[in-house]
Amino acid sequence: MKFIRFKQGEFIKSALITTNNEFVEIGNIDYITFFNSLKTNQYSAETFIQKNNLTRHTNVDIDSLQLVVPIEAEEVWASGVTYLQSKDARNYEATEGRLDSETFYDKVYDAVRPEIFLKSTKRRTVGPDEEVYIRKDSNWQIPEPELALIIGEGEEIIGYTLGNDMSCRDIEGENPLYLPQAKVWKKSCAIGPAILMPEAIDDPYSIELNCKIYRNNIELFSGKASVNQLKRKLDELVHYLVKENDIVPGTILMTGTCIVPPNNFTLQVGDEIYISSAQIGTLKNKVNQNH
């Protein structure tokens, strides 16, 4: 079962997408309120549909809906260097391609405490089919496709979605203290297209992510990875995010990337980024710059 939000005229509405690809409209309820109501009543989403005699539409072209960000998170946090591919990429940046010494990325990859940082806020985050921005002061920029977790009360994981952690490899590689500038700017984070509910998946580590980048309708890059390649446990990342922190339900935690374009690649205005998962859907964004 998936939860989506979509625009219809001037209104934002919510709906469920069943495993049989049925479309079930549920009003304008937000995900946290909906999930908590299920928890209070000890309902599954399927039971909710049945109890409320909701209509199941089989003729709705879901791809034609004007989807919006599935949850308006006040904060989006991210995890760094959680995959071997990510560690290798960061080391390439830090050593200017020489790879001739151990770096702090090697240390954090093996450390007990993971790297956790604030990635985005509500007004900096975009949804499906919206533009993401690249910086004007960077010459080496990439998308980072990631599984993103929706956090509920305490350390509970109450949903899964896709995230694009736009990143400047040259800025971060120049100096690790530049990390906020390499990660956070206007429209530097995309989330969507849907929230996969926990009841719909037994093993989130089985989720596979794909990323394709097109320029002038020509595929420039294609990569894929599985969450089971993650060095750390999802619960472990959530634990360190919440620890001594003030995290409200609906906060998003991105879990790191294992898909990195070649070192000679950088995004350009007009590129199209497709991040997909069979269970969650496709997050599509076009690249632009702030004017």
Image (cartoon, helix red, strand yellow):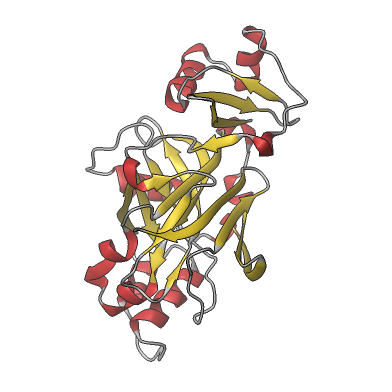
Q: Is residue 180 left or right of residue 90?
A: left
Quarter containing the C terminus: bottom left
Q: In which quarter of the image is residue 262?
A: bottom right
Q: Position of residue 93 (x, y in %)?
A: 38, 80
Outermost residue, front side: 291
* 120 vs 13: above or below: below
Q: Nearer the viewer, residue 263 or 242?
A: 263
Q: Position of residue 152 (x, y in %)?
A: 40, 32
Q: Which residue is drawn at 66% across and 12% down?
A: 54
Q: Would residue 233 be seen by someone viewing this image from the given angle?
A: no
Q: In which quarter of the image is residue 112?
A: bottom left
Q: Residue at x 56, y 38 (%)?
A: 194
Q: Residue at x 65, y 20 (%)?
A: 46
Q: Position of residue 269 (x, y in %)?
A: 48, 65
* 251 vs 22: above or below: below
Q: Nearer the viewer, residue 64 or 83?
A: 64
Number of marks in picture: 0
Q: Position of residue 104 (x, y in %)?
A: 30, 75
Q: In this view, does 281 lie to the left or right of 56?
A: left
Q: Would residue 88 be seen by someone viewing this image from the given angle?
A: yes
Quarter containing the N terminus: top right
